[in-house]
Amino acid sequence: MSEQGDALLKVRGLEKHFPITKGVLRRQVGAVRAVDGIDFEVYRGETLGLVGESGCGKSTTGKLLTRLIEPTGGSIELDGRDIAHLRQGQLRPLRRDMQMIFQDPFSSLNPRHTVGTIVGAPFRIQNVKTEHGVKRAVQDLLKLVGLNPEHYNRYPHEFSGGQRQRIGIARTLALRPKLIVADEPVSALDVSIQAQVVNLLEDLQNEFGLTYVFIAHDLSVVRHISDRVAVMYLGKVVEIADRETLYANPRHPYTVALLSAVPVPDPARRDRAQRNRVLLTGDVPSPINPPSGCRFRTRCWKAQEICATEEPPLVPRLDDPASHQTACHFPVVEGEEVAGRTPATTSA
Amino acid sequence: MPDGHPFLEVKDLKVHFPTDDGVVRSVDGLSFKLERGRTLGIVGESGSGKSVTSLGIMGLYNKRNADVSGEIWLDGDELVNAGSETVRKLRGDKMAMIFQDPLSSMHPYYTIGRQIIEAYRVHHKVSKQVARKHAVDMLGRVGIPQPDRRVDDYPHQFSGGMRQRAMIAMALVNDPQLLIADEPTTALDVTVQAQILDLMHDLQSEFNSALIVITHDLGVVAELADDVLVMYGGRCVEFGGATTIFERPEHPYTWGLLGSMPRMDRPNLDRLIPIPGLPPSLINLPSGCAFHPRCRFEPRTGGLGSTVRPELVRAGGSNHLVRCHLPTEERQRIWAEEVKPELEA
C-alpha cells in the first residue's frame, strides 16, 4: 500500500497557534500551540491513522488538512499544490478532492433537511452535472453506503446513529474525493454498529482507491484500519511507522505507555496486563506553555538533562528503516524494562 | 453471607416507561445476585437497559413516569416497595454511584470539597471541620495531589481524570457496600482510563464492596469483572464468570460483540464481523427471541427463534446461563467450530 514516493499529501512544518487575547484591545498575550510543527506524508490509497489523547492536536490537524481552518505556519501540499494559504474562492474547487467525515452524526447533519438535500448538497454547491439528475445520483450513493434509496425524503432524526454516519459518508463520497479525513468517525457508535461502519469504510476504499486520514483515540480501531500510524502528543508527532512496526515495536516511551494502557478483552491476561501496564502519572501539560525540549519529558521515566534542553527531531532511531521515525533521545529497545516493568508486547 | 442471603439480589426487576407511543420496556425481568468483594460487569449496547438497571437499583427514577416492579434486596432490605425516604437513607451511604460524565454530574457552582462534605454530612452527624478532614483524606486516597489545597477547587479547575477521581472520592466517602459505576471511564483517555481502572480495583479490595460496572467496552469488563451479564433488549441474554463469557460464550449476541471488536492482543483480522441490522426498539421488541432478526443461526432453531421467547437456562459452564433456543451441545459446537476460528483467523 504505502509505495514510497507517491504522496498525495505532503505536510511540512504545519503549525496552528490559536491566539489568546486580553482586554478591550484584544491584545495577544499568548497562544495555544495546538499543532506545533508537524511533518508527514499520506500516500495514495493508504490509510494514515492519527492517534493521541484529547488535546494533542489531532482534530486540529484534521481541520488543517481539509483547510477548514488556516494554518499559522508550514505547508500542506495536496497533489503537488500548496493549499496552506489559499483563499475561500480558490479553495472551493479543491473541496471536491478533499472531504471530511465528522464524529457526531447527530450534529453534523442539518435536522431540517431531508437526506436527499443533505447528500445532494455537494452537487449543487459545486455545480456538478449528474448524468441522470441529482436525485438518481443521491439514491445511488445511498445504495452504496448500505441505506435504502427510498429513504431519500426522510429526515435525519428518523435514522439511528449508525445510519446517520452512513448518510455523512454518502455526502462525503458524492464528489469522489481523493482524500477523506475522518475525525473519530466511529467513536459515537455502538460496538456492533462500529464494525459495520469500519467495514464500509474499508470497502469504499478498495472500490474507489480512496486515501484516508483516520483520526481516532481508540488504538484497536486504528490498528485495524490503518496502513501507517502517527502518534501525536501535545501538538507534535512523536512517532510514525507502519502499523505492524508501531504496535509490535514502539520506540517512543509515550507510544509504549499508550499501547500498554489499552484494556485487553481477555480476563486470563488481566493480572499480567495490570503488571505490565506503564502508568503515566500526572496530566498532559498545557499547550499554552509546553515544556522545553521534549514535550513528553515531564511524564517520561527515561528523561534526562538533554531532554529539557534539546528537542528531539523526528528521525529513524537505532536500526529502524526510514519509514519508522521517532522523536526521542532515548528510544525504547525491544524487550527493555520499562518503568520497572517489561512492556506488554502486542502481536501485530 | 452468613445467613445464606446474597448481599444484593435483584429478582425479576422490571422498569417500564409508559409513553404516548407505547410502553418502553427498558428492563424486563432481570435477576442476578452479587456478593461483597465481587465485581459484576453489565455489558450491552445503548438502549439495552443497562443504565436503567442501575438507576432502578439506586431508586433514581420518578415514580410518576416509571413502572418499577420486582424485588431488589440489599443486605436484607427490600428497595422496590420501600418508601422513598428509606431508599434515600441508603443511597449515598450503603450504595453509591459513579456516573459517566463527571463534568455534568458535579455542581459547577460549588467547590469539590463542599460537594463531598455535603455527601458525608447527609449521613453522618459531624461538624463541617470533621467532614472536611474526611473529604481531604478521601481525595488523597483516590490519588489527587495536594488534596488539602485542591479540596477548595471548583470542578472546572480539575482535568477530566481528576474529576473522575473526585467523583469516586465522593461516592466512597461513606464507605458504601455497593458501588455502581456507570461507564466510569468512557469519557476518559486510555492512559487515564488505565489509572482509574487500577484505582477502582485497588479501592474495591480495600473496602471489600460489591461493585457493578456498567459498560459497552468488553476490555474494561475483562479487566475488572468476576461475573459478566450481557444485556440485550432489556433482558439478560447471557450470564457467567468472566472467563466463561470470554472463552466459552454461548449466546450468538455475545459472539457478535466479540467479533465486532478489533483486538490488540490478536493478529489483525482482515475484516471485522459485525452484527447485521440495528438494536431493537424497546417499545416493540421482535417476537420470539429479541435477537432473532440479527442472528445468523436463527434458521437452525426450526422456527422457534421468531415465535417463542426463549427462557434463561443453564448453559455449559458452571453458574452459566443463556437465553437461546439452540441446544447446549449445538451452541458449544458452533462456538468451537464456526465462530471461534473466524475470530482467530
Image (tube, rainbow, N blue to C red):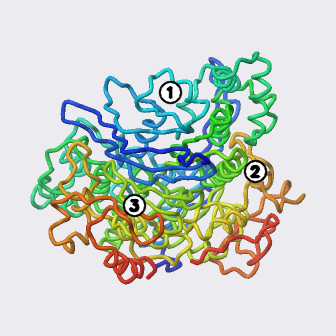
Give whichever of B119, A329 is nearer the camera.
Answer: B119
Residue B159 is drawn in which quadrant?
top right
Residue under pointer 2: A281
Q: Which amino acid does label 2 sit on?
A: Thr
Image x and y of residue A190, in percent: 39, 54
Q: Is residue B5 above or below residue B131?
A: below
Residue under pointer 1: B87
Crowding at dot 2, Cα within 10 Å, few <14 / some 14-19 / many 20+, comes out as few
- Say what secondary structure mark 2 lies in: loop
Give whichever of A215, A267 is nearer the camera.
Answer: A267
| Residue B263 image label | none
Query: Circle 1 marks a residue in which chain?
Result: B
Q: Do the residues labelled 2 and 3 touch (CB within 8 Å)?
A: no
- Say what secondary structure mark 1 lies in: helix
- The span from disc 1 to disc 2 (Cα, nearest Å) is 39 Å
Q: In this view, does B211 lie above or below A193?
A: above
Residue under pointer 3: B238
Image x and y of residue A330, in percent: 81, 68
- The span from disc 2 to disc 3 (Cα, nearest Å) is 38 Å
Q: Are marks 1 and 3 on the same chain?
A: yes
